[in-house]
Amino acid sequence: MQHAPFEQIADGIYCIETGLYRHGLAACYLICSEDRLAFVDTGTDHTAPGLLGVIAAIGLTPEHVDYVIPTHVHLDHAGGSGRLMAACPNARLVVHPNGVRHMVDPSKLIAGATAVYGEEGFEKDYGTLIPVPEERVIAAEDGQTFALGSRTLTFVDTPGHANHHGCILDSVTQGFFTGDTFGIAYREFETGKGPWMFAPATPVAFDPDAWMASLDKLMAFEPQAMYLTHYGPVENPAALVDDLRQSIRDLASLALVEEGRDDPERRERLKTAITQYLIEGARAHGVDYENARIRELLTLDTELNSQGLEVWLKRREKRAAA
């Protein structure tokens, strides 16, 4: 069976390439304890066959999978959940309570994604979304623990990027699987200064105050590592968290310049400002790519961040008018 590219990054933890858009953009993780398995994040529907191949490559079977845990229901994190659950008969889907309905009935996710990407683009990049039977779903509460062999996995509610976001603490490595809560650190931008961090303000629930509180919550556990979906492990998170906090503040500030200016060009102005901000940030971190290459690598993020920040502004403006 063909498997997705993967590597062991810690004791019993494998980082798996999902193949979305380009190598190094989105990962997911397989945790192995004794002969029990759990996936954290799944990539898209297209990713699932390669994940099953990884199980075979380490000498186990889908029957050994106890949990499939999307950190949140954005498609690069949860899109493969249904197909993976269908192939793993003993698995339970562990998901934030606010995400349960979308995993049981993904019709709204499909409609929203189709509206953004078009039917052809959605099928090409994301495939489809397969419903998960409700009786196989666990709505995880903040602090709830799950036994996996000799490990304990703890679900921690972390809104800010999305209101259906949770991070998973691994008892063996004292590392968190962070989805998008601990930001983005693409490998292409790593320099002698270490990873370059920035926040993904993806639609539709960017909330800088909640995000800051979520970071406080994670750091109170004194984690030793963070396992990012975008992309891979980062060590010594205490040395990185302030850069991420600044990124959240900066993105909010960029957006607030446009508050009250709800015209058809606002999103394009936001996109231009975000692009310039990220290029300057990469340069200050010592990245020596040409501007065009930096812009190319960040195209998806600049587009999604501009959309997400505009949604946030509209929400603020609607509250102010109420």
Image: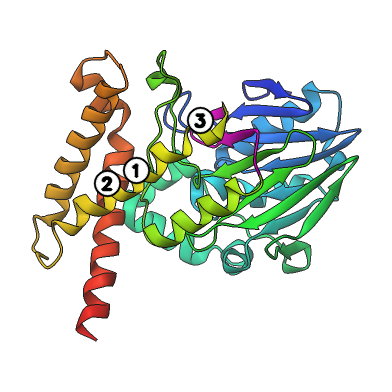
Dot 3 crowding, Cα within 10 Å, few <14, some 14–19, many 20+: many
Q: CA distance from mark 3 to mark 1?
A: 19 Å
Mark 2 closeness class: few <14, some 14–19, many ≥20 residues within 10 Å: some
Mark 1 crowd level (few <14, some 14–19, many ≥20, 10 Å Cα): some
The relative height of residue 259 versus residue 127 in the rendered view (above or below) is below
Residue 287 located within the stretch drawn in magenta: no
Indicate which disc residue 246 carries: 1
Q: In which quadrant of the rendered view does residue 31 lie?
A: top right
Type of residue at label 3? Tyr
Marks 3/2: CA distance? 22 Å
Residue 273: image location, x then y, percent: 16, 42
Front one among 299 and 47: 299
Note whether 91 is above or below 55 in the view shown: below
Tell me the residue at 56%/40% (across/down): 43
> Callout 1, which amino acid?
Gln
Q: CA distance from mark 1 to mark 2?
A: 6 Å
Give the position of the C terminus as an image quadrant: bottom left
Name the amino acid type tagged 2: Asp
Residue at (17%, 49%) from the top-left corner?
Answer: 270
Camera sees residue 129: no
Mark earlier in primary sequence (3, 1): 3
- Give coordinates of residue 116: x percent, y percent: 32, 53
